[in-house]
Amino acid sequence: MLEISGQSVTSAVSPPPDSPAAPRSSFWRRWHTLSLGLLVLTLALLETLAPPTLRFWTWLVSLALMLLIVLIAGQGVTGLWLGLLIDTRNKLSLARFQMMTWTILILSAYLTAVMVNIDLQHPDPLVIAIAPDLWLLMGISTTSMIGSPLILSVKKRRMAPEVEKERALSALTRQAVDLSKVAIIGQLVVNQHPEQARWSDLFKGSETGNVGQLDLGKMQMFLFSLILVLAYAAAVAALFQQGRGVVDALPGVDGGTLALLGISHAGYLVNKALPHSDIE
């Protein structure tokens, strides 16, 4: 048990600097820079040279190229392909996941629409209507991404009782988790290194009181976000498949659906803010 800046930390001894498990000082290499430059150039050439009749395929390829840019940037910074989704707990963050999903989806659609308008010699190619509900959706997603770490920072300063810590470590042991790779900071159970991040982090609790358990708030937000993302992607696909003229607006979002998503995000944040652990 260690005491760091007033925080109780249960952890294993870190590997020596020359150990294979020790983190490297920098993961960014020349190939990261070259790859990003090549991807940006490919994206620009695609949007410039692709004919308007292939707007649907142009959008799909743009979506894939933006995803590759995100993955390579994350790998260059953290050494992991999912690095952009890993938060300060060294776990995959659901808020980061849904925020990046919406960002890539909307930006790829907007860029494709602009380039189609330029190819069709529209006098104002950048004038593309974006429904207010879509901005509200992005605002809700941003609020969750910002609010989540703020809530977690508070719980890092609250000390969990030793008995509860022992129960948490016992629960992790039953799930075949290597205890030398985890740490307890305040009420949070975190990973020692980002390599321990798993997709299951998106759905599990991370406090001493609910570690290893399915978090219903996370599951609800994931399902709502997944369904809405798929529905919006289908609407964008239909826009580019069926349309042949100028693109003057991106698909909007139904107010009722937006309300459901807002409720889901509110439930996610409230559930995260509620105490799931005892206080020492």
Image (spheres, rainbow, N blue to C red):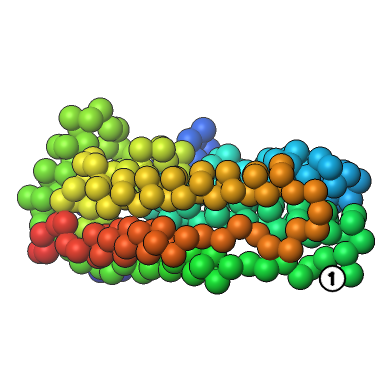
Q: Nearer the viewer, residue 15 or 170?
A: 170
At x 75%, y 38%, the residue is 57
Q: Is residue 252 left or right of residue 61?
A: left
Q: Is residue 62 visible?
A: no
Residue neighbourhood size for the residue with mark 1, other residues' Cα within 10 Å, grouped as few (<14), some (14–19), many (≥20): few
- The vertical placement of 16 against 111, above or below, is above
- Which residue occupies 76% across, 70% down? 127
> 51 and 10: which one is in front?
51
Is 152 on the left or on the right of 77, as rendered?
left
Q: Where residue 45 sits in the image (x, y, percent)?
A: 88, 47
Pick out the residue farthest to the left: 163
Identified at 10% across, 64% down, the residue is 280
Q: Which residue is mark 1?
A: 124
Q: Could you tell me which secondary element the residue under label 1 belongs to?
A: loop
Residue at x 14% of width, y 57% of height? 277
Q: Hey, which quadrant is residue 61 in on the image?
A: top right
Foreground residue among 196 and 235: 235
Residue 9 sits in which quadrant? bottom left
> Given the image, on which type of amino acid does mark 1 rest?
Asp
Q: In the rendered picture of this protein, how many numbered marks are placed on residues?
A: 1
Q: Is residue 249 visible?
A: yes
Residue 162 coordinates in the image, percent (x, y)? 10, 53
Where does residue 96 sit, x and y in percent of width and height? Answer: 48, 54
Residue 174 in which image quadrant: top left
Front residue of this view, candidates 189 and 15: 189
Q: Position of residue 178 (x, y in %)?
A: 29, 33
